[in-house]
Amino acid sequence: MIARLRRAWTSVVAFVSETEDASSLACVRIVVGLTLSVHVARFWLSGAAALDAVDMTFGGLGRPGPLGALSPFAVDLLCIAIVVAASCVALGLVTRAAIASTWALFRILIGSVGLARGSYDSLLIDTLVVLFFSGAGRAYALDALLLARDGDAKRVARWPRMLLVLQLGMLYFGSAIAKFGSGWVPGGDASAI
């Protein structure tokens, strides 16, 4: 029994310790950074942030978030900071600090938004956590150009990519299960439409 557990543990450690080229995680980093910067810029520039993230005490529809009630000025600053930080994530400029600040700022914004929240917000927040630990700034990044090292600098652990694949698989599996309800099937009540 102990030998079987030892073999199982050894195989788990070997799987987690495997490395791979950083380019796949770098592509995820770029897509997440661009998505967040464009999403928040549109949310801000369209005026939706002024309506939905500004607290009710200031005339908006937002709610008190992690930092309390947000004024229109605070929402503007928050949106600008997220766009800048997410752009740094996409460019791979001070990658880990940019990922951490994007994560924190976006959580503050999402926590203050009254109506316009979506499940992809949580997915992006979770993806930022995985990217923080992944070494995604080792390829296709300004950090990789400025801090070029020889050797295995472009190698990263495989487990973050596998975790992201598992996360997407669970998302789509849950979505498929939800579509078995009466609102989605022919002859149902069409409540999903």
Image (tube, helix red, strand yellow):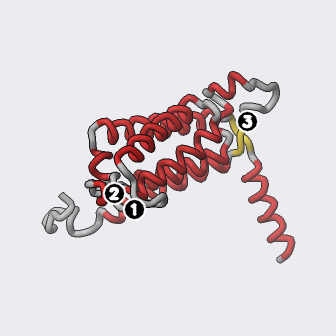
Residue at numbered disc 1: 64
| Residue 161 shows in this picture | no
Q: Is residue 179 above or below residue 38?
A: below
Q: Upstream in the sequence, badge 3 or badge 2? A: 2
Residue at numbered disc 2: 55
Q: Is residue 174 above or below residue 29?
A: below
Q: Position of residue 12 (x, y in %)?
A: 74, 59
Q: Amino acid at mark 1?
A: Pro
Q: Secondary structure at mark 3?
A: strand
Q: Is residue 157 left or right of residue 177?
A: right
| Residue 83 shows in this picture | yes
Looking at the picture, tell me which residue is in the foreground, 2 or 146.
146
Residue at numbered disc 3: 155
Q: Would you identify the image quadrant in which residue 122 lies?
A: bottom left
- Residue in the picture at 37% in, 51% down: 71
- Residue in the picture at 77% in, 49% down: 17
Q: Upstream in the sequence, badge 1 or badge 2? A: 2
Quadrant of the image containing the C terminus: bottom left
Q: Position of residue 89 (x, y in %)?
A: 56, 36
Q: Is residue 187 left or right of residue 30?
A: left
Q: Position of residue 120 (x, y in %)?
A: 40, 51
- Residue in the picture at 53% in, 37% down: 85
Q: Amino acid at mark 3?
A: Arg
- Residue in the picture at 43% in, 58% down: 111
Q: Nearer the viewer, mark 3 or mark 2?
A: 2
- Dots 3, 2 in contact, CB < 8 A: no
- Which residue is situated farthest in the right direction here? 3
